[in-house]
Amino acid sequence: MISALGTATALSNLLAQGATTSLELVTTYLDRIRSLNPSFNAIVCCDEGRAVEQARAADQLRMEANKRGESVPPWLGIPIILKDIICTRGVPTTCGSRSLSRFIPPYDATVVQKLASAGLIPLAKSNLDEFAMGGSTETSIFGSTRNPWDTGRTAGGSSGGSAAAVAANFAPVALGTDTGGSIRQPASFCGICGLKPTYGRVSRYGLIAFASSLDQIGPMAHTVEDLAMLLSIISGHDPRDSTSIDQPEVSARLAVPSCPQEIRVGIVREHLDHQGLHPETRSAVEAAMDVFRTAGAQIVSISLPHARYSIPAYYIIAPSEASSNLSRYDGVRFGHRASLTQTETIGSSLIDMYCRTRSEGFGAEVKRRIMLGTYALSSGYYDAYYLQALKVRRKIREDYDRAFEQVDVLLGPTTPGPAFLLGEKLNDPVQMYLEDLFTVGANLGGLPAISIPYRTTSEGLPLGLQFQAAPMQEERLLQIAHWFHQLVDYRPKTI
């Protein structure tokens, strides 16, 4: 049954008031995971002992600071869930793949270190499509994640485990990753908020790579306010990541008492007029336009003429980078290795070992993308496919640059429709890829984009709205999304 819940911001206030303790929060969430996770399969690994130990330490730190009259980090003792593609020292990080089923990182990702510095407590690792390649969290070695709103439907992907975990109230916040929509699409399907930051805004050090020029870590939560706070914690320059932008952390301040400076909201014609858009999704976007108009915002029709090439370009660039990144999983240094027979020796069957290791270690979707990428990068085809896709990517970014000369944000659908049935698209890769229709553009352009819940369908399924902004404009993007939720008196829901 859907009911109101405590957001991370609300819980931090309770902690500050002494109305609860971090230990109480952690044990309550862990109990909830044990009870409900078999129904949703959102969590693949819990580090209960460490979480309880950290909760006790957070409570002790808060008590001692209170005695001295000192302040503590605002989110000290708040639990969080991490997608199982972000390295955590001493805790399995599998990417949902047999290739890394026994991999335990010896170090923490930069975002994990930042969370620890802010006092947050990682409770568990969440399920995902294998190596984040998918849109339904059905390709994991741990099995499919089910949507808490309807367990016969997908939670989305590839960050479906993180989205389902927040929707099921296993923790107030989570981290996911977004390569072509993998934060925003599951956020829309599960009725929560999800943000893909500007490429380079959040360090990728310790993120196991799928497509290095597209991957970005981002926050998932019930409210835009919580997204802003979590982004302020994990953002910032990291010298260990060569793609990290040397800019200060994002501010968590979101006060928007009225229409912020007569904002201009762009509506992408190619998205709203697309024949694949579900009628109820189109109706939701049109209703949101009316909300903005009534509040005094200017609505501007925008064209992104190269938007129709986003899916073809993405599904050349992303598999090409995946082919390169996943070449390291050969069974030699780490990860799964195929066993040799008694009559085989390493010297006589090294190539066989490579082939069997990769055949056993990767699932069907990962193999498909490796083959696509390897073909696109091969001699004689590089110029015709990969290089051409890069040129299209440049055109897509130029379309966005022109658009943001006219508007502050772009408003549109996050996904073509609500969450689809489990198994419905699994054996039809093209239909699955088209679920990224409205999200991949932000990844190709390196833009920040957010999905926020707005309405439910006639079947009671969540529908999300997507807002996109110019690079490095997260604060503006978050302010406008937060303001919209204030206008419609949004109240977060969970099971």
Image: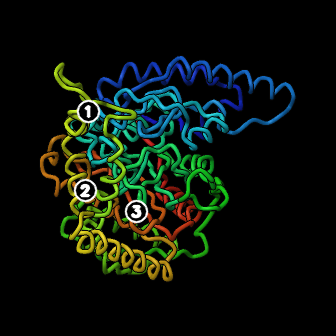
Nearest the eye: 1 or 339: 339
**Element under disc 1:** loop
- Whole-percent x, y for residue 441 in the image: 36, 67
- Mark yes or no: residue 455 visible: no
Q: Residue at x 56, y 21 (%)?
A: 50
The residue that label 3 is drawn on is 443
The residue identified by callout 1 is 347
- Disc 3, SS: helix
Type of the residue with mark 1: Gly
> How many residues crowd around disc 1 within 10 Å: few (fewer than 14), some, or many (20 or more)?
few
Residue at figure coordinates x 23%, y 57% from the top left: 433
What residue type is disc 3 on? Answer: Asn
Q: Which image quadrant: the C terminus?
A: top left
Q: Amino acid at mark 2?
A: Gly
User: Residue 311, relative to residue 265: is it above or below?
Assistant: above
Q: Which of disc 1 and disc 3 is earlier in sequence? A: 1
Residue 305 is labelled as none
Question: Which residue is under mark 2?
Answer: 417
Q: Residue furthest left?
A: 427
Q: Is residue 315 in view from this perspective?
A: yes
Q: Nearer the viewer, residue 361 or 424?
A: 361
Name, please, the residue furthest toward the right.
68
